[in-house]
Image: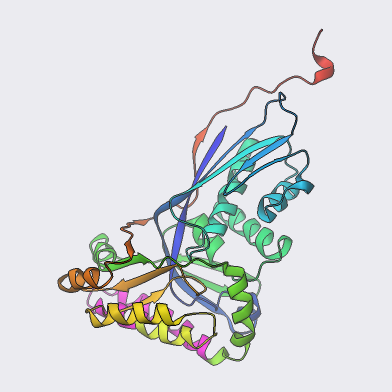
Amino acid sequence: MVITKTPFRMSFFGGGTDIPEFFRENGGSVLSTTFDKYCYVTVRHLPPFFDYKTHLTYSRMEYVDTWEEIQHPAIRSAMEYLDMHNVRLTYESDLPAKSGLGTSSSFVVGMLSSFYALKGQYVDKKRLADEAIYIEREMCGEAGGWQDQIAAAFGGLNRIDFRGNGYEVHPLIMSRQRKQQLNDRLLMYFTGFTRFSAEIQKKNQTAARENRSRLREMQALVEEAEHILTDQSADLNGFGRLLNQTWKLKRGTGSQVSTQAIDLLYQKGIEAGAVGGKLLGAGGGGFLLFYAEPDRAAAVKEAMKDLLYIPFRFEEGGSQIIHYTAETPYPAVCDIKR
């Protein structure tokens, strides 16, 4: 039996520039972090006592004999890719899916890691990220960028640069105290709206092709934000002001990014004293993030009291195998003496 634990991510700057159609021509950069909310994937070989060969438990249950019968596209594709059979898989999560935190990519990364471990193989973080990108973007044909899979596999607070057909992950070098200060000034709320990121991405990509200059501005903010975080003498509140700036830019990249209800919630947070903030993910719903100085945090929380507050801490481990027990294989039926 194998159990993997894979973190979710929050993207601060550069979202949209990680889409291949953009970065292969213009380059791209994203600044993001993972945090201590996770998805858990448990996998084992299914014992030969049932009238089905594979049992899957996620938001629904599936009982099938072959991977071709599987309804969940990512599970079906991953099992085909790694030639997996006779599997019992269970998915659990700390936060809801379709909410702007890269949950589907975290699931695929964790699932791949668990499948490889079940085969007795260790896979490094880059391979996990690369193969998760391939499964979601190529095999499943889902629109979107590459940052989610990379963040989930590597973990930590990173700048990710995209060039040509590749990428590089650069951990941000900053003091523990400054990172703690940043964490303490970030407030996250669940809006109650969920949406399918790939659908939002597909609708926004057409508009994004017409907004390349805006995406380049969003990319430039990555370097500014990195400087603020890594320079001990820089005013940390500048990070919050840049969040507000990138949110305004992002809202202009597609009609599906925000809604009137989300705009009203965001404005309430700003009026309560937040320096800046943004909607996490592709848009359309999910989680709102605010940056507020310590003396304004209480006022922002009061303004957002009708929403669910999600406390979190940054994490640095990325996807991990947290349990592994070698299985004793059952003999083939023809080998059993009767």
Residue at (35, 66) in percent of width and height: 189
Residue 242 included in the magenta stretch of the image: yes
The quadrant holding residue 31 is bottom left
Q: Is residue 131 left or right of residue 158?
A: right
Q: In this view, does 201 lie to the left or right of 296?
A: right
Image quarter where the C terminus lies is top right
Image quarter where the N terminus lies is top right
Q: Is residue 134 left or right of residue 185?
A: right
Looking at the image, the residue that sits furthest to the left is: 295
In this view, 27 is above or below 197: below
Depth check: 321 or 261 in front? 261
Depth check: 66 or 220 in front? 66
Location of residue 310 in the rendering, given as x and y in whole percent from the top left corner: 33, 59
Depth check: 189 or 245 in front? 189
| Range drawn in magenta | 214-243
Q: Can residue 164 be seen in this view?
A: yes
